[in-house]
Image (cartoon, helix red, strand yellow):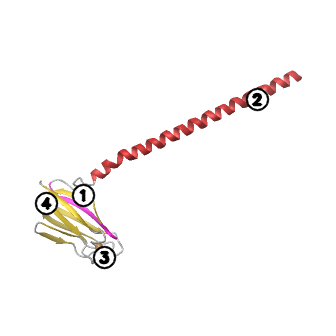
Amino acid sequence: MNAERRSWKGLAALLFGVGLLLVTCLAVTFIAAACWVGAGAWRDGQVRKPPAAATAVVPSGTPGAGNTVRVVASEFELALDSLQVPAGTVTFVVENQGQVPHDFRIRGDGVDERTPMLQPGESAQLTVELQPGTYSYECTVGGHARLGMQGEFTVTGS
Ligand SMILES: [Cu+2]
């Protein structure tokens, strides 16, 4: 009876030991996996950033129908989805997502065109014929250009 009890104790101790070992192994595996996944995500983030930035300058719009450039106005930024298009007809679709009035003016190479003043939430289209060259754009509301609502727009040979 005593011997049997001792062997049960021994078995229990053995099982406990094995269990502890298993839990430790699982924990180590889990931490290693977490580190690996984390490192992978970081590496992917590093790799994916450059292509995303590159697509920002790819001309948008349907070929043959001219190019469309979307412009989002806010305080105090004019965000264009493309800063470079081939020469020809370019339609700027300007939307004021800000809290105060803004507009969009593009100048250069004899061109000087602008949208009407846009109230918050309003949008307008501005279609211009652009030759190859460098143009400047801005919001004409007093002080907005200096606060950041300006930039350069490039038209390449078609
Ligand atoms: Cu403005």
Residue at 44%, 44% in the rendered image: 41
Q: Is residue 124 above or below residue 86?
A: below
Q: Is the distance from the Cβ of mark 2 to the nearest ligand 1 atom less than 8 Å?
A: no
Outermost bottom residue: 142
Distance, label 3 to label 2, CA atoms, is: 77 Å
Distance, label 1 to label 2, CA atoms, is: 70 Å
Labels 1 and 4 touching (C-beta < 8 A): no
Distance, label 1 to label 4, CA atoms, is: 15 Å
**Residue carrying label 2:** 13
Labels 1 and 2 touching (C-beta < 8 A): no
Residue 9 percent location from the top left of the image = 81, 27
**Residue carrying label 1:** 82
**Residue carrying label 3:** 101
- Tell which tag, 4 or 3, sits nearer the viewer: 4
Residue 50 percent location from the top left of the image = 32, 48
Residue at 21%, 56% in the rendered image: 61
**Residue carrying label 4:** 133
Q: Quadrant of residue 141?
A: bottom left
Q: Earlier in the sequence, mark 4 or mark 3?
A: 3
Q: Is residue 97 left or right of residue 32?
A: left
Q: Is the distance from the Cβ of mark 3 to the nearest ligand 1 atom less than 8 Å?
A: yes
Q: Is residue 10 left or right of residue 103?
A: right
Q: SS of the residue at dot 2?
A: helix
Distance, label 4 to label 2, CA atoms, is: 83 Å
- Tell which tag, 3 or 2, sits nearer the viewer: 2
Q: SS of the residue at dot 4?
A: strand
